[in-house]
Each structure stands twice: as structure tokens, then as C-alpha cells.
Amino acid sequence: MVAIADYNVREKSQWCPGCGNFAIVGALKGALAELQIPQHQAVIVSGIGCSSKLPHYVNTYGFESLHGRGLPVASGIKLANNRLTVIDVGGDGDGYGIGSGHFLHIMRRNYDLTYIVHDNQIYGLTTGQASPTSQIGMKTKTTPHGVVETPFNPLSTAINGGATFVARAFAGDMAHMKEIFRQAISHRGFALVDVFQPCVTFNKLNTYDFFTKRVYKLEEQDPKHDTGNRMLALEKAYEQVKTNYERLPIGVFFKEDRPTYEDTLPQIKDKALVEQPLAGLDISKALDD
Ligand code: SF4
């Protein structure tokens, strides 16, 4: 029996008081405990950024990689041992900016990975520059007269790009976020969960108050929403654009069953790579020592 407390660590958090990251790590531990995933069977990978410190704060295997490079590391781990639960975490700058090429190609291959993006619409670790999801007009250190570029739309990109589970959560609603994480981790295939995560220090526009007034749960306000319908999912993904950020749906937008990348590789379909003999050497013995 795995309890939430089993994922706790003694490490002191470096996050600012009130940061949305605290709720995300709490919800993730809750989802892992509900799914009864033992610590040694889970790996949390990250890139670089405030959110990418998360692997330090959960008692599972962890890997803090390079800026924007969490997904390639996560997919490599999955190929080496496809029995593991692999979760990649990072920020909007990390994943939708510098790591965007990896995001596109890893989701179309449908690795069995969960990708959680702490989307705070700003670069937090480097003290407040515009990010790929900053709203038009938002004033930051790099855009003193306001952002002029069209923001990146992670949900429509994922729905079109081959992700087989696409959802959004809000760090101000931890119970709902935990349920979304639980579904994403249970899903076989590439799952994106974009999380509205207020950066209380550098983003004075997209605050808890801002989101609380605007978010609504798809499953409650639109019970007819069909997660198997790609066109409906796209329509919902564009709602924030069409309403100029006045209505922000959260919940599961899209789901589909498709063979994972690992399932289509005969070399690892039945036996994980780490369990196979390599050039006369049984590497599982080395791993046991
Ligand atoms: Fe959170 Fe922003 Fe502080 Fe980073 S800078 S820890 S994102 S509040």
C-alpha cells in the first residue's frame, strides 16, 4: 500500500510562497498514490525552470535535464524500460519554446508518457520575460510596450499533432487537477496536461483571481462534450482565443486509443530492454547489484 506521505522528501522548496507549483506537486503525489504506483516504478523528468525543480520534491526516481530537453530524456527512459511510469514536467517556456521541436515529434509517435506543463505565461526563473503563451498586450521585461506575437496554443497543437490525451487543469483547483493527472497517467499513450499555474511573483495579469473568474469545467458546463470528437475538442481549444480569455475551459478535451510507439517495436513489445541480454551480458544482473 503506497500512501501520499511515501512520496514526501526532506528537501526544502525553493519556490516562492503562494506559487501554483505547490498545488501541482501535491496533486501529482495524490494521483500517484491513488494509482498505487510504487516510488521505484516512477520516474519524473524535467527540463530547466522553476517548475523543473519538481523532481527534487517527490520521492521517486528523478532526472533534471537541460532546458527544453525533458521529453527526449523521458522517451529514452521509456525505451530502456517501458514498464516504468514516466512523467515529464516543465514550464511553457521550456516545453513550448526551446523544446517545441521535441514536443511535436514525441507526441506524434505516441510514447506512453505523461507531460505536465506548468503554464504560467511567463519565464519565472529568469525573472519575468514574455513566454510563448503570454497574452497579446502583456507587459513584461522583454515587452515593455506589450506582447505583439500570437500566443502558442498548446491544446490545439496537441490535438492536431498526435497526442492521444489532451487536458487542461488549474492550480487553484487541486482536487480537479489530481483527477486529471490520474486519468492522464492511466492513459496508454502520450498525455498532455497543460496547467494554468499562477506565477505570483512575476505575472501580475494571470493571477489566481484572473483564472478563478474565467475557468469552467468542461464536464460540468458542457456534459455533451465528446472527448472522442477531434473537431469539438479543437473548438474548445480555441475558446480562449475566441472569447479573448474570458472563458477558459478546463478538463479533458480529447482522448483516443492508438498503439503506442513502444507497442509497435517488436524488440521491446514483450520484454523491456533492461531485461534483455546484451552482447552476452545480462544487464539485469548489473542493475541488481
Ligand atoms: Fe513560482 Fe513564479 Fe516564484 Fe517561479 S518565480 S517559483 S513560477 S512564483
Image (cartoon, helix red, strand yellow):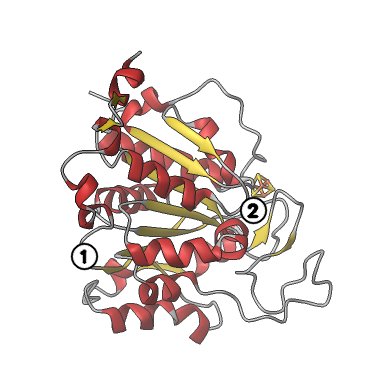
Q: Which residue is mark 2?
A: 199
Q: Disc 2 beta carbon < 8 A from ligand 1?
A: yes
Q: Which mark is residue 272?
A: none
Determine crowd level at label 1: few under 14, some 14-19, many 20+ residues with C-alpha closer than 10 A. Answer: some
Instruction: Report whether residue 251 is seen.
Output: no
Report the residue that reaches farthest toward the top.
Answer: 289
Q: Position of residue 139 (x, y in %)?
A: 77, 71
| Residue type, label 2 | Cys
Tell me the CA gap for discs 2 and 1.
35 Å
SS under mark 2: loop
Of labels 2 and 1, earlier in sequence is 2
SS under mark 1: loop
Q: Is residue 137 above or below residue 47?
A: below
Determine crowd level at label 2: few under 14, some 14-19, many 20+ residues with C-alpha closer than 10 A. Answer: many
Q: Position of residue 172 (x, y in %)?
A: 49, 53
Q: Is residue 193 above or below residue 80?
A: below
User: What residue is shown at x 51% (from left), y 74% (from top)?
Assistant: 153
| Residue type, label 1 | Arg
Q: Which residue is mark 1?
A: 258
Q: Nearer the viewer, residue 158 or 219?
A: 158
Q: Quadrant of the C terminus?
A: top left
User: What residue is shown at x 26% (from left), y 52% (from top)?
Assistant: 262
